[in-house]
Amino acid sequence: MVLICLLTLAATVTSTIASINEAEFAPEDIITKDVAIIGGGASGTYAAVRLREDLNTNIVVIEEKDRLGGHVNTYVDPISNISIDYGVEAYLRYGDTAAFFTRFHVPITPYTQSPQTSVYVSTTSGSNLTSYTAPSLEAQIGAIATWLNLTEKYANITLPGLWNFPAGSNIPSELLLPFGEFAQRHGIEAAAPIFTVVSNVGIGGIEKVLTLYVLFAFGIPVTQEFLNSSLFVPANLSNSVLYDRAYNLLRDDVILQSRVTIGERSANGVKLVIQSKNSTSKKLIKAKRMLFTPPPSVRNLEPFGLTGNETAALSTFTGTWSFAAVARIPAIPAGYSVYFYAPDATLDNYLGIRDWPWTLSITTAPKIPPEEHLFEILFAANYSLSHADAKRIITTAVQNLTISGTFASNSTNATIDFVAFQDHNSILWRQPASELRAGIVQDVYALQGQHSTWYTGGLWSEDYTGNVWAFTDSVLPRLIASLHSNGTR
Ligand SMILES: Cc1cc2nc3c(=O)[nH]c(=O)nc-3n(C[C@H](O)[C@H](O)[C@H](O)COP(=O)(O)OP(=O)(O)OC[C@H]3O[C@@H](n4cnc5c(N)ncnc54)[C@H](O)[C@@H]3O)c2cc1C
């Protein structure tokens, strides 16, 4: 349990790098707002629209990239002019998700997967995993229906987010079982492939991950929507359109390509120095509250001068390194999906498919003319690696597909040309059961509102857009109440 130091709580929290001298800023470079939102991805954009348009609160969004949308990545193929959404693909209807699309006049349509021939190959050799047969559709549906039956009773402690999650012996003991034991006990091993492919959970071995964390990855809403086939996508538009339209609405209150370099936080508000990537100009933002939406790692929060108890709680998370790409791969015929599974995945061992430190899937990009051989790639690892490292592993894996004879080779086709490549690194709950019992969830949630700092984003809820928006809707009333409670409004 993290010890809360009252002295630290009471103090103004200042970055250790430098302190802010307001006199150094020209009046036109000082922006005064109710709420400063850090990050303009799914949760930051949603929060900005809700706060400014619905909750009568003035805001500013600080986003480090040159666009809003976070994990939404769209590549427009210059040959066919067709868009490929190679990050976020489809949306849950959970909460008010569909209504947010309607608000921006983005029509939606049910998500359908384009038919593909699936090939399962070994991560080590690229050869066909002849010992592996994917579970039948019936077996998968049966397993995830059982999973839903077993977990629905936990909605009140896991949705939206962990506000009501218990500590100590009040944590349901089966949630603290390793997932392998839970799955075997209930005969739901056939759910492992879909859990891992959809949510990327369990890199290095899903059987060792606590059942609670598998529930965070493939929770009640996503399970229901898979069973009901109710996922949706924008109709005839890319996923980026929603964020482009949100940007058009919010434009005057969004600062792109900028980061906070120094933050000072107290119970009465925050002061943030903003540095643009493309110029030496700096701005000072004075806001009554800050809403932090990127992964709340100690590193990401460094400029804000974390206190001891903040550092203690936030340093318990585990990193995750993932990359999404589009690549031209002549060796793989169009219409194929290639899943790289651990060599010990077998018909009898669905739980073993992730017993490897990285995972890779290569799927045909939908609607693209077959002669283009364009594929979407998802690669993730349970260790830190750079873009170059990730590209090297993917390239070797593709070369192995022809060396092993999985796909026919000739002198020119064992190549891979990355036409788009993005990293999606984040952090995950992976603390052991002992820390959960000792109250780490409560310690982390106790940070909400401290030093005028509120949080939302993928760490705080199940990490799907709909869940993150629903969680954001649970933070905003608390944030607004805090604005009123100490008379800062
Ligand atoms: C490859 C991939 C595919 C996915 N597919 C789906 C899907 O099909 N359906 C679905 O519902 N969910 C999907 N998800 C999950 C979904 O993307 C997340 O739930 C959602 O994006 C989380 O929102 P967020 O605001 O927490 O993070 P993000 O959307 O990542 O937003 C965080 C933002 O903060 C910015 N930022 C980071 N650090 C700073 C800083 N210091 N200063 C300023 N800005 C900063 C980032 O640039 C980013 O724009 C997918 C995730 C990944 C990685």
Image: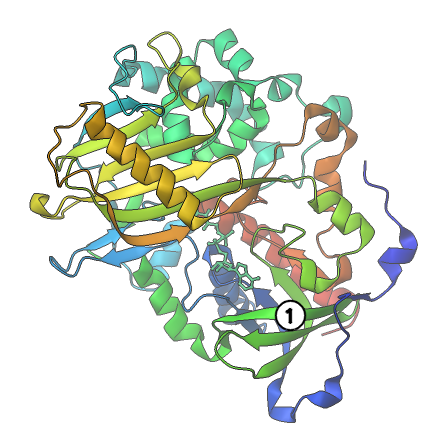
- Residue 355: percent from the left, percent from the top? 46, 21
For the point 43% across and 16% down, which residue is it? 352
Left/right placement of residue 458 relative to residue 260 reads: left
Q: Quadrant of the C terminus?
A: bottom right
* Residue 238 visible at all: no
Reply above or below: 321 against 25: above
For the point 33% across and 39% down, which residue is it? 394
Q: Quadrant of residue 438?
A: top right
The amino acid beneath tag 1 is: Thr
Q: Quadrant of the N terminus?
A: top right
Q: Secondary structure at mark 1?
A: strand
- Residue 238: percent from the left, percent from the top? 26, 56
Q: Quadrant of residue 25?
A: bottom right
Q: Nearer the viewer, residue 432 or 144?
A: 432
Q: Quadrant of residue 190?
A: top left
Per the image, the residue denoted by label 1 is 261
* Residue 70 visible at all: yes
